[in-house]
Amino acid sequence: MTNRDHQDVYPLRETLEGIPLFHGLPVPLLEQISSFSRIRNYRSSHRIIQANDLGSELFLVLSGSVKVSIEDREGREIILAVVYPPDFFGEVSLWDNGTRTANVSALEATRVVAIEKEPFLRLIREYPEITLRLLSALSARLRETDGKLMHMAYGDAYEKVSRTLFGLFEKEGETDGGVPFINDRFTRQELASLSGVSRETVSRSLGAFVQAGILRIGNGRIYILNIDRLKKEGRIP
């Protein structure tokens, strides 16, 4: 099977309590949410949500990461976002009876909490604090999206690519001997999609950053040798 229900080491209630969306809620309320939730594991590349299908669950990412994407008229993938813990996805179908608006696939081995839609909607009608937390998270996401769209519209190619790389570093970056890096796990087409440029432009920009001593690419990693220069290229404060 490509996915399965998984009993965590800790009760699901404790897992939910550790997620910002539910942190601090009364124990009886967490237990109620746990009663209609399941932990699931997905292998890399597994399609979790199919666009145009009916949606019946909200998903919270516990570990791993997923990509949210759509396809253009020629069938080419356009990545809208990468979702990391402790964020969530699939929320659009909570509010109406419409179909899923995008595909969601695991980028790596990923664990999620799947929350059933109907009992969750009944619950948040009784506890509006959960709705306020959802709205707060969605507002923050909208602000981030607005900023991304602005830079995609007005920034040059180097700015767009550098912003994508720095954004990935903020989400999943590591250091090796004091040198920051991100794993080179996205194809150049995926980086292009995230940046709003062509694959050729990404390759050209990466080459220019390497030549300028900002990046070094090798051993499955993109090393950031000069993070201040990368931020300057992206006009990042």
Image: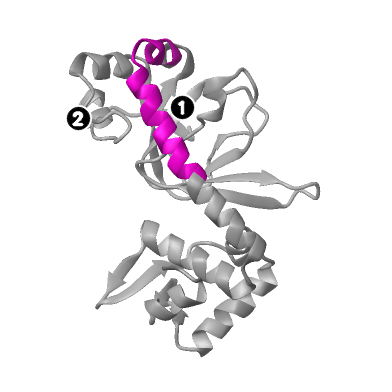
Residue drawn at x 66%, y 73% is 201
Residue 222 image-quadrant placement: bottom left
Asked if one can make out residue 24 in the rendered structure from this viewpoint, the answer is: yes
Which residues lie in the magenta part? 121-142
Any mark on residue 10, and which?
2
Asked if one can make out residue 190 in the rendered structure from this viewpoint, the answer is: no
Q: Nearer the viewer, residue 107 or 24?
A: 24
Principal secondary structure, stretch drawn in magenta: helix
Residue drawn at x 41%, y 16% is 120
Whether 105 is among the magenta residues is no
Would you call the spot at circle 1 few (<14 residues within 10 Å), some (14-19), or many (20 or more)? many
Side (left or right) of 119 relative to 211: left
* Residue type at tag 2: Tyr
The residue labelled by disc 1 is 58
Q: Secondary structure at mark 2?
A: loop
What distance separates the C-alpha of mark 1 from that of mark 2? 21 Å
* Residue type at tag 1: Leu
Q: Residue furthest right?
A: 74
Q: Residue 44: image x %, image y %?
A: 48, 47
Residue drawn at x 44%, y 66% is 166
Q: Residue 142: image x %, image y %?
A: 51, 43
